[in-house]
Image (cartoon, coloured by chain):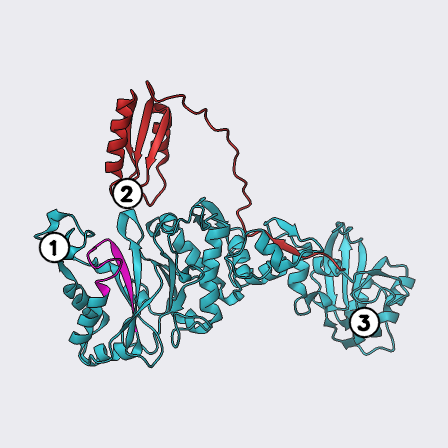
Chain colours: A red, B cyan
Amino acid sequence: MNENLVVLDPTDESSPAARERVERLDGVAGKTIGLLDISKARGDVFLARIAELLADRGAAVEHFRKPTFARLAPVDLRQEIASRCDAVIEALAD
Amino acid sequence: MPPQSAVPDGLVAVVKRSCPTCELVAPVLRQIAAAGVPLTVYSQDDPSFPGDPAAVDDRRLEVSYRLSIDAVPTLLRFADGAEVRRLEGWRRDHWQELTGVGDLGPELPPHRPGCGSLSVAPGAAERLEALYGNGLGARRIELGSAEDEFEALFERGWTDGLPVVPPTPERVLRMLGGTARAADEVIGEIPPNLAPCSVEKAAINAVLAGCKPEYFPVVLAAVEASCREEFGMHGLLATTLSHGPVVIVNGPIARRIGMNSGVNVLGQGNRANATIGRALQLVVRNVGGGRPGEVDRACFGNPGKYTLCFAEDEEGSPWTPLSVERGFPPETSTVTLFGGEGPRVVVDQLSRTPESLASSLAACLKTVIHPKLPMAFDVVLVVSPEHARVFHHGGWDKARLRNELLGRLMLPGAEIVRGAGGIAEGVPEGMQGRTLPKFRPEGLLIVHAGGSAGLFSAILGGWVNGQTGTNPVTVEIRS
């Protein structure tokens, strides 16, 4: 009975779903860009400047905010961003 | 493993050659077979025994396991595929009644007890359950014959950088024996992937960590606490700050499983302290998918992220235990989970009054995270027996000490606004005229622990607290 060692899998045994990336935008003019503030200090400062730069380039801007950076964005918020925007910029700041 | 063919109807005897009672009844088995009664004999150790009648080889003990044989010889009667009667050992009158054959073993004594079945020998039960049982749900992974098992576990990414114990089914079953909870019970969803963690998955990781089964209820409580929304494990894992879960154990279980609350309490050398904290980290890594450099973005981390787990010294303490302060009865064992960094020591060998020592500790507590940043961070203050004695002699209980510390940690806005003291970091200028508390009252946890010599205390600074971050969580340890 000289069998190979059997061990039990300590992971959750899931494998990540493979998704195709959406096609890259050819430019921001005429597009709606979401700006997601994750509620980190000074993220608003960073995003305000990004908003200016996007406006200069003819993009419409929508502002979103996560309740806290320490937890996942609520599903509703993610759905809202996905339905209203062509792309999203998420501010990591400090 | 091929499925075991059904046990035939009629009489079934399970024997082993190394059992003197089985040797004794060998002629009886011949008598029964000669009488034309259908009889199948299974031999646990030697298929040539008893020879006549010929035995079925059960050296793998599969039949013995499936029939739950405790002793040999065991004589059973099967009808329509189901067991209807069972006898253990030799007893002439019962055997005659069961077999319907008279005058069995006339030279034998009327009764003789049997021996232990090989299927219940030490270690065999877990091995057989792992082979033939169906109680475990985790994927089985067979390592290659040329693989070193320790290297193989590193390569699969299951370790924290130190070697782990291979989680064989036998070891996992022994770990599961440490709790009455069902293997498939889900304890919670582990961040960051919010993967459901069953008791079995926790057991596998507890084996990896090197836990003994008696530690397992503490591991389960720690995992449960880490899944509570208010603990905020996802953020604690993902943060660029250094913090990680700190496990503080209270109640009778700490002593029962040999946890350290004394000399070198926050250091190495005690298996329970070391492996319980490690098991929690491995659950987050393996079940939750929280790995450094991926979702774990810590700038520095800290050595406590391998493990940081200790017990409060309740027996030597003049004070109320942490768990009782947090609303649990003294006889209830608990885990308190705190999102903290590694410990830093405070030396004060001269204070002999509680007032002086409290001021000393407050001066050091002020520096948690940054001397000019108040309110957003909790702390655990570990007070050594020698420091606690100073407070006790002065008549201060824990609550008094906490209030005195909080009072000494009211920070004038003018000293901590941005730019004050030539330091840009600080609170917004608008706070100039206010006085701000360094800690929220529920965010200053006091624990009594450490060796008997040393006029020291230790500070474990916390991660961002409250709604946006972490809150200490205490849960009962259930068996």
Which chain letter matches label 2?
A
Which chain letter matches label 1?
B
Left or right position of B307 against B170: left
Residue identifier under label 2: A40
Left or right position of B422 against B293: left
Residue placed most toward the observer, B475 or B313: B313
Residue B448 vs B10, above or below: the answer is below
Image location (x, y in percent) of residue B438: 19, 59
Indicate the secondary structure of the residue bearing disc 3: helix
Was residue A18 drawn as part of the magenta stretch in this picture? no
Q: Amino acid at mark 1?
A: Gly
Tags 3 and 2 both on a single chain: no
Image location (x, y in percent) of residue B460: 31, 63
Image location (x, y in percent) of residue B333: 39, 66
Residue placed most toward the observer, B430 or A10: B430
Indicate the secondary structure of the residue bearing disc 1: helix
Q: Earlier in the sequence, mark 1 or mark 3?
A: 3
Image location (x, y in percent) of residue B20: 80, 76
Q: Amino acid at mark 2?
A: Lys
Which residues fall within the magenta stretch? Answer: B365-383
Mark number for residue B413? Answer: 1
Disc 3 residue crowd, few under 14, some 14–19, many 20+, Cα 10 Å: many
